[in-house]
Amino acid sequence: MSIIEQSRQGNVLVLTVNNPPVNAFSPGVPEGLHAGLDVAEKDDSIGAVVIIGGGRTFIAGADIKTFDMPREQAPDLRGFISRLDGFPKPTVAAIHGTALGGGMEVTLACNYRVASSDAQMGLPEVKLGVLPGAGGTQRLPRVVGAQKALEMMLSGNPIKATEAKELGLVDEIVEGDLLAGAVKFAEGIADARPLPRVSERKVEGGTPELFTQARQGIKKTHKGQLAPTYIVDLAEIASTKAFTDGWAAEARLFMMAKDSPQSRALRHLFFADRERAKIPGITKETPVSTIKSVGVIGAGTMGGGIAMNFLNAGIPVTIVETGQEALDRGLGIIRRNYENTAKKGRMTQDDVEKRMALLTPSLDMGDLKDADLIIEAVFENMDVKKDIFTKLDAVAKPGAILATNTSTLDVNEIADVTKRPESVIGLHFFSPANVMRLLEVVRGAKTSEGVLATSLDMAKKIKKVGVVVGVCNGFVGNRMLVPYRQQAQYLVLNGAKPQDVDAAMHALGMPMGPFEMSDMAGLDIGYASRREAAKKAGTQIESDWSDKLVEMGRKGQKTGGGIYDYPEGRTPVPSAITERMIDEYRAEKGITPRDIPQEEATKRLAYGLMNEGAKILEEGIALRASDIDVIYVNGYGFPAYRGGPMQYASEQGLQNVVKDLESYGMEPAPLLKELASEGKTFAQYDRERAKGG
Ligand code: 3HC
């Protein structure tokens, strides 16, 4: 089968793109399409051309893998589109699956578009840190108007065929066989002249106010990002200048966006998100069971949030507590959460009732005997967890998955109290568990491949981003917070104010810095766990400045004050009390504060994360650097346009990172030093490992 298949149906030439899996515009595609147009141009018996995708979709866009190729070797999408737009015979795009990015741009350069009723069309380039670069910024506004085009290009979200038809993006919806319908349509318009060309139309609704508003809007929705600003500029050019001017400006801005660190970061995450599902030892043959019923132990904040994920997916949940009061409270919170969503209009009262009807409260662990998956979500205490797993082992049916939601404890130790450690796994949800998309899937030493594969499949069904990690204290995400917090502490002791430290992370695009995060989580949590650890180790712990805040009752947001004051809800305001505590503590320790530049603070914090990430990678706790990035972007607010802490460090050049760390007196991880000395990036390390290097 050739990459572009030519076939005749009466006087219509059909060009079928066969470039699985998604018919991306890869090398070979433009050549084949040009060859088809050559035939159509020369052969007088051909009256019209239909372009259609073979397999499951129309063209899903430019081939993202070719973005870093030298320009002359990359497939020339713009060249093909220019020719298509000026082609003397009618062209019809026949769309099924998804016509995205460059694929949708091909359709816009055709004279006509027909689609299956389940097709989708969109310009998702912004999600890759670029802009529609093959005429999309100029043609889409000419069809749907400036406002709708901006909405589509800035969100990157596709629309369905029915909406496309209403907007005039699609001329006809074909029920039944798409190719037959498209050929029939093409026969019908073969003699139509003049040919309708989108590039010759005028843009509607492109008022100066619209663009002012759009520029204001993206400051909030796409803070710090380049591509959205270019998109607005180009939509404005489309509205005010000739098509040729816009076409030229688009080419220039596309190249600038494509070559930016932001686009490299977002493309890295696109592939990282697909790589994370590839687990050594798991193949298509690995048995995956369907989770039809779930048990949750613990109806606290975590347990309730976890239960909601399954209820949302229509999976019944039995939730078990030790006392009636705690159970009632837990159920009340779940109901209130749903009712709040209904109040905001994002769910009907009927939806609320349907979900609540799937929830069975119980005080008896025996009620979990039929559950396919049981998740323990009680407080972090090894003895309590061991006791629960011993009991679960006795009641759960054979083959049930027994999961712990621990965020720190040893999953292997928990598994070993059961007679079926192969069925035990860690499912580390993040708070609020019904909202946060990240799920660390903790593979124990004895967890079976089937249990792992089923857990990943389940994660997808409940719309979580499941990332497989190994067992260690804090797994990946929370373990990396330890050096991060140490650096935050260092910065404060040596002269920075907490707000300076947080601002250093805002500068990177993080919505919250380390101290804002501590205040949100509650300072008392760390306070208690440090003391418990010290008690176990038989050591004494000395209160530092933040411990003293806890001892004064300043535990964070929940008490209206912690490191910051909170006079109005959740907005942090620098606190004079905290500053006094810090001053006193520095004086006690004999530390002379210095002025710390923001750049140093940002690097200490971000590299602190990455350096621990490198250790985690070397120990095999994470399978890939890109998995660590997925964890930080989806669970810890690391901005996607920086690509995650590992990608961010690679972008700075690992040799520079090592130099910086050494100049700060921080010890670079051995793997980091090795990669730096070889002039490599973490992405190269991942690729070499994937190839078995
Ligand atoms: N280029 C290269 N590879 C691509 C690709 C693309 N545009 N789109 C998907 N792939 C690859 C994926 O990496 C994956 O590879 P793998 O199997 O080796 O991991 C494979 O195709 C299948 O992809 P998914 O797992 O994502 O398959 P789904 O069925 O879940 O989703 C999809 C299909 C909706 C098409 C989804 O892949 C997608 O959203 N792709 C990206 C679409 C896109 O962003 N297009 C715009 C590109 S930029 C552009 O066109 C610039 C232009 O304006 C100049």
Image (cartoon, helix red, strand yellow):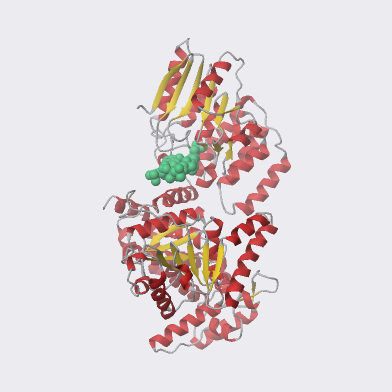
Q: Where 618 sits versus 196, above or below?
A: below
The quadrant in which residue 401 appears is bottom left
Residue lying at 32% horizontally and 63% vertically, measured from the top left: 620
Residue 51 percent coordinates (x, y): 48, 25
Residue 48 percent coordinates (x, y): 51, 17
Specify the quadrant that holds the N terminus.
top left
Q: Where 177 sits versus 501, above or below?
A: above
Residue 250 percent coordinates (x, y): 56, 36
- Count of marks, rendered view: 0
Whether residue 432 appears in this view of the structure is: no
Residue lying at 56% horizontally and 48% vertically, measured from the top left: 226
Residue 169 percent coordinates (x, y): 61, 31
Q: In which quarter of the image is ligand 1?
A: top left
Left or right: residue 568 versus residue 116 is: right
Q: Judge by depth and name the residue closer to the eye, 342 or 499.
A: 342
Whether residue 439 appears in this view of the structure is: yes
Residue lying at 54% horizontally and 42% vertically, measured from the top left: 124
Q: Which residue lies furthest to the top in this view?
A: 44
Q: Where 37 sits versus 407, above or below?
A: above
Q: Residue furthest left?
A: 693
Q: Judge by depth and name the residue closer to the eye, 487 or 89.
A: 89
Q: Judge by depth and name the residue closer to the eye, 496 or 97.
A: 97
